[in-house]
Image (spheres, rainbow, N blue to C red):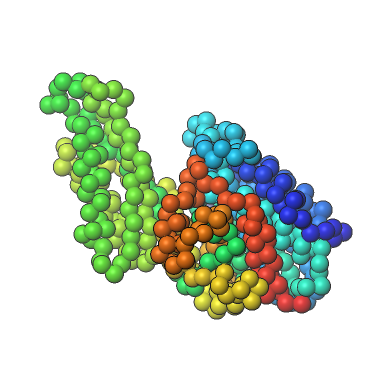
């Protein structure tokens, strides 16, 4: 059975459905079931439950190479504020047991929809390509664990090794455009938690306490000297302290403070130095404050840098230029976002070509003719992970499907 390619109406209705039903990392059961059912109906050989909720569809279509097309499936614990009529009102339970709002704030619903669209078209028309197609719907990209989980669960041993890994991510630049960068395309990301121990007491008697609020404040300020004072002018690192929690009441000195940090780097040596500096500063500030116990630094997650293969990018980019026009394809430069798609390519030992798909209403860029004006327009728009992030349905979905088809046919020529 081959079926027919999804129409723009089908794509939009699947997208709206996915958007209003986001699921947290490793909890993508509804999404995975929807994907598996569709793939089976189009004649794919479907394997479910790889690395938790991962789904793989394989379609053999004559001799030739093998290409892996990947989409990630998870949403985020964000309270949606887009005001869209298909906005999520769902809630979920995070790994710590907290009740959290859910939103597809990173656009992974776009990725799933587009890969379904491409999978349907490649099944419906098998005269335009030849070889072995692997469509991979990956769990848990947001926590940097899904690709590793699929690999650890025997993805390539059980289902074969592709010759290339291809995939895309939607972003806040004009829909209809595609960005791609050879080489180091996205940074490594490390998430750390720091727990600073003080000694709690009455707010009126600081001499009888060790104040973790002051300790945390000093730690935050000194952590911000790592990039300015320890990292070279030609090196890149980002250190963001995205959460800081201590205390419950104005006149109580709490007994501990917690910091949540995220670090972005491109160079492994810069990464090592930055992580070592964080650890050193946390411990030293605790000691300087007279903390009763050393600071605890936990490494929560890690995304390796995304290394796009130069030759694979050149080949994919020229296919895009031919299909969409060179003026719609641009070089993003290296980005400080992070992705775990590179784990699939690294583990398979094959090249990766990963690109960015415009998802913003092109009308919002109407007055922007220079790259500077374009960047200014981009900065004014809600970014991925924002509660206001809302890609336009078209032309985003159609171009996303077409980009995957173009790449697949380039790597699996008829
Ligand atoms: Zn994300
Ligand atoms: Zn994402």
Residue displayed at 77% across by 62% down: 121
Residue displayed at 51% across by 54% down: 364
Is 400 left or right of 95, judged from the image as shown?
Answer: right
Is 48 left or right of 170, judged from the image as shown?
Answer: right
**401 shown above or below 195:** below
Residues 67 and 161: in front is: 67
**81 shown above or below 251:** below
Is 398 left or right of 184, judged from the image as shown?
Answer: right
**392 shown above or below 66:** above
Q: Is residue 236 visible?
A: yes
Q: Residue lying furthest front in this view? A: 367
Check the picture and name the quadrant holding the N terminus.
Answer: bottom right
Residue displayed at 60% across by 62% down: 176
Residues 148 and 185: in front is: 185
User: Dividing the picture into quarters, in which one does residue 237 lie?
Assistant: bottom left
User: Dividing the picture into quarters, in which one does residue 355 lie?
Assistant: bottom right
Q: Position of residue 20 (x, y in %)?
A: 63, 40
Residue displayed at 50% across by 41% down: 387
Q: Is residue 339 visible?
A: no
Check the picture and name the quadrant holding the C terminus.
Answer: bottom right
Q: Position of residue 338 (x, y in %)?
A: 47, 57
Q: Position of residue 391 (x, y in %)?
A: 57, 51
Q: Position of residue 56 (x, y in %)?
A: 70, 57
Residues 200 and 232: in front is: 232
How many numbered marks appear?
Answer: 0
């Amino acid at each position: 059975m081959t079926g027919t390619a999804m129409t723009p109406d089908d794509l939009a209705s699947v997208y709206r459905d996915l958007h209003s039903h986001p699921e947290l990392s490793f909890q993508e059961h509804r999404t995975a079931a929807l994907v598996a059912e569709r793939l089976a109906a189009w004649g794919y050989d479907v394997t479910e439950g790889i690395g938790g909720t991962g789904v793989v569809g394989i379609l053999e279509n004559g001799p030739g190479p093998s290409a892996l097309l990947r989409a990630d499936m998870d949403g985020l614990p964000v309270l949606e504020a887009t005001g869209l009529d298909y906005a999520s009102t769902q809630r979920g339970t995070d790994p710590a047991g907290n009740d959290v709002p859910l939103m597809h704030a990173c656009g992974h619903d776009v990725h799933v929809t587009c890969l379904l669209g491409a999978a349907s078209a490649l099944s419906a028309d098998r005269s335009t390509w030849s070889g072995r197609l692997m469509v991979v719907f990956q769990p848990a990209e947001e926590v940097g664990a899904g690709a590793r989980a699929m690999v650890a669960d025997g993805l390539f041993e059980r289902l074969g090794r592709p010759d290339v890994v291809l995939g895309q991510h939607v972003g806040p630049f004009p829909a209809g455009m595609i960005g791609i960068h050879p080489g180091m395309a996205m940074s490594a990301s490390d998430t750390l938690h720091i727990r600073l121990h003080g000694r709690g007491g009455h707010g009126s008697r600081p001499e009888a306490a060790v104040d973790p609020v002051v300790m945390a404040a000093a730690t935050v300020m000194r952590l911000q000297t790592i990039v300015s004072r320890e990292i070279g002018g030609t090196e890149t690192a980002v250190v963001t302290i995205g959460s800081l929690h201590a205390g419950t009441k104005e006149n109580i000195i709490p007994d501990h403070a917690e910091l949540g940090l995220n670090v972005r780097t491109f160079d492994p040596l810069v990464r090592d130095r930055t992580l070592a500096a964080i650890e050193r500063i946390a411990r030293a500030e605790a000691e300087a404050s007279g903390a009763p116990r050393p600071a605890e630094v936990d490494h929560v997650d890690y995304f390796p840098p995304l290394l796009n293969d130069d030759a694979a990018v050149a080949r994919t980019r020229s296919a895009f230029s031919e299909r969409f026009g060179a003026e719609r394809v641009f070089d993003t430069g290296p980005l400080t976002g992070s992705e775990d798609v590179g784990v699939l390519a690294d583990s398979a030992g094959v090249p990766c070509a990963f690109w960015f798909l415009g998802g913003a209403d092109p009308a919002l860029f109407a007055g922007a003719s220079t790259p500077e004006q374009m960047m200014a327009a981009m900065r004014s728009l809600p970014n991925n992970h924002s509660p206001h992030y809302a890609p336009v349905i078209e032309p985003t979905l159609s171009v996303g499907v077409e980009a995957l088809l173009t790449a697949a046919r380039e790597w699996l020529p008829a």
